[in-house]
Amino acid sequence: MGWIIVLVVVAALAGLGYWLYSAGHWGRGVEFLGETKTEMKKVSFPPREEVMATTIIVIVVSFIFAFYLWFADILIARGYEWIINKL
């Protein structure tokens, strides 16, 4: 059963490659990958400490907003209940 899946995937990739080549898209794809490689060399990745710090900030701020929205939801629901009970 596993070899059938591998055969289908290989056939699909071969068909895709043939279609790209015959339609003239193969050269554009190779050019795109080359440009991508060039651009990736220009990228500066932040150091580990900066990534850890910003990740912690995102998590803390997410919890703060979650608490705020939870509290606002309770206030709005109770406000609606109060208005409906008064009417």
Image (cartoon, grey):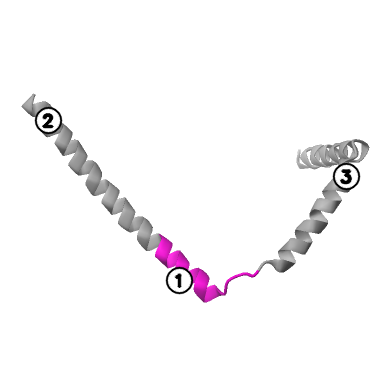
Q: Position of residue 19 (x, y in %)?
A: 88, 36
Residue 82 found in image quarter: top left
Query: Per the image, is 86 magenta?
Result: no
Task: Residue type at mark 3: give it.
Answer: Trp
Q: Residue at point 14% right, 32% down?
A: 81
- Helix, strand or loop for disc 3: helix
Alpha carbon separation for disc pair 2 and 3: 66 Å
Residue 84 found in image quarter: top left
Residue assigned mark 3: 26
Task: Residue type at mark 2: give it.
Answer: Ile
Q: Position of residue 61 (x, y in %)?
A: 36, 60
- Quadrant in which the N terminus appears: top right
Query: Per the image, is 46 magenta?
Result: yes
Task: Residue type at mark 1: give it.
Answer: Ala
User: Could you say which is closer to the camera, residue 33 or residue 59?
Assistant: 33
- Helix, strand or loop for disc 2: helix
Q: Position of residue 79 (x, y in %)?
A: 15, 37
Q: Is residue 67 above or below residue 51?
A: above
Q: Residue at point 80% right, 42% down?
A: 6
Q: Residue at point 17% right, 33% down?
A: 80
Q: Which mark is residue 83?
A: 2
Q: Is residue 36 left or right of residue 24?
A: left
Disc with the residue nearer the chain's start (2 vs 3): 3
Disc with the residue nearer the chain's start (1 vs 3): 3
Q: Which mark is residue 87?
A: none
Q: Is residue 85 above or below residue 61?
A: above
Residue assigned mark 1: 53
Q: In the rendered structure, which segment of residues is drawn in magenta?
A: 44-58
Disc with the residue nearer the chain's start (2 vs 1): 1
Q: Residue at point 74% right, 67% down?
A: 41
